[in-house]
Amino acid sequence: MRENFSYELQHIDKYTGARAGVFHTPHGDILTPVYMPVGTQATVKGVYPRDLKEAGSSIILSNTYHLYIRPGDELVKKAGGLHAFMNWDGPILTDSGGFQVFSLTKLNKIKEEGVYFNSHVDGSKHLFTPERVMSIQENLGADIIMQFDQCSEYGYTHAQAEAAMDRTTNWLKRCVDAKTRRDQALFPIVQGNMYDDLRLESLRRAKPFATEGIAIGGLSVGEPKHRMYEILELIRPELPESVPRYLMGVGSPDCLIEGVRRGIDMFDCVLATRVGRNGTAFTSKGKVVARNGAYREDFTPLDENCNCYCCKNYTKAYIRHLINVNEMLSSMLLSLHNITFLHKLMRDMREAIFADSFTAFAEEFYSQYGKI
């Protein structure tokens, strides 16, 4: 098994700068740009791993905080790590758990040493330090791990955001010092909230540690989309060329296109399965809210341009029926369809990059899907 990581930049669209490459990891190669389905608790909700592979998933995510709380990182280590525990032989990425510590735990106290928090499950008290988070992720055994960072909330003042950025930098250095496994790639995270100067400074501090990849956090957290795109444009000239660039928590079709347009290589989001469980499908002609009465007698597939298991075998009328009688199969089919749709979108973008036709591809996509 390969123990090192490398990124091969294969082509840059000459009109937009969108990138296509391949990220070599110990558990396999990842063609970029790539959408990564989220398996928060060591499973992508409602989708069999075999179906994920058939849909085109080359890498999936799990969450450090949730797996620390249940079943515990020591148990996962005893099982042989996440790959063995969840029976997934491809690459895995784990986030640091920082976002969950701040968003899910109603009681938390941020100190320079780390974050004291109460479990959202049983109220028990815990402490996450950079060193502890590295230890947890090493026990989980993912290929790609994230530094422990402080994701400042949308609406923070400049002073609050700067303090969070400073702490993120300090914690990054401690993460680097604490990391021991050579078969894991550690990504630093660029923070800075919505402030241009802080974003550039955070990136400047993170770059020396971006030897295997770099992540951009703290976006898609409530700000207008145009502001996210402005920040990506701002930092783009300063991002390292030789490693993959990961935009955290972004996964709507339009944001994937606009992120790739601005030089991003990797994306993740729970949106595909979350909206699937709520009865919504992404299609080449826009969103389909399958529970709507308009589809009661619609015996066509969700998307005639999709070859997923759902679209090849079932109609909108049937899926609407499943939703309205609360059958879990509706969530499974819609989740699988949405993941398949996003994987195809990424493959199509990759082909357009190689053809130097990304702009034309995006315009054609929006003409059918509708720009949001």
Image: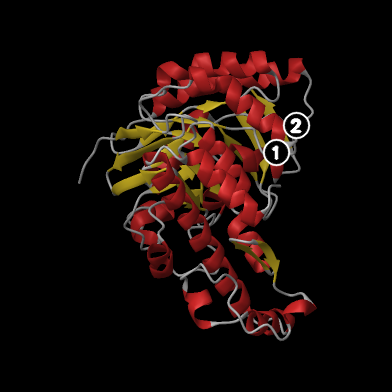
**Quarter occupied by residue 278:** bottom right
| Visible residue check, residue 252 | no
Between 84 and 225, the one nearer to me in the picture: 225
Q: Residue type at mark 1: give it.
A: Val
- Asked which secondary structure carries label 2, the reply is loop
Q: Is the Cβ of the residue at disc 1 closer than 8 Å to that at disc 2?
A: yes
Between 276 and 92, the one nearer to me in the picture: 276
Residue 172 horizontal/vertical position (percent) = 49, 23
- Which residue has dot 1 on it? 221
In this picture, residue 153 sits left or right of residue 92: right
Q: How is the image coloured?
A: secondary structure
Q: Earlier in the sequence, mark 1 or mark 2?
A: 2
Between 19 and 162, the one nearer to me in the picture: 19
In this picture, residue 312 sits left or right of residue 273: left
Please tell me whether residue 268 is drawn above or below residue 11 in the rendered image.
below
* Crowd class of label 2 (few under 14; some 14 to 19; many from 20; radius 10 Å): some
Q: Residue at x 59, y 45 (%)?
A: 363
Q: Residue type at mark 2: give it.
A: Tyr
Q: Which mark is residue 41?
A: none
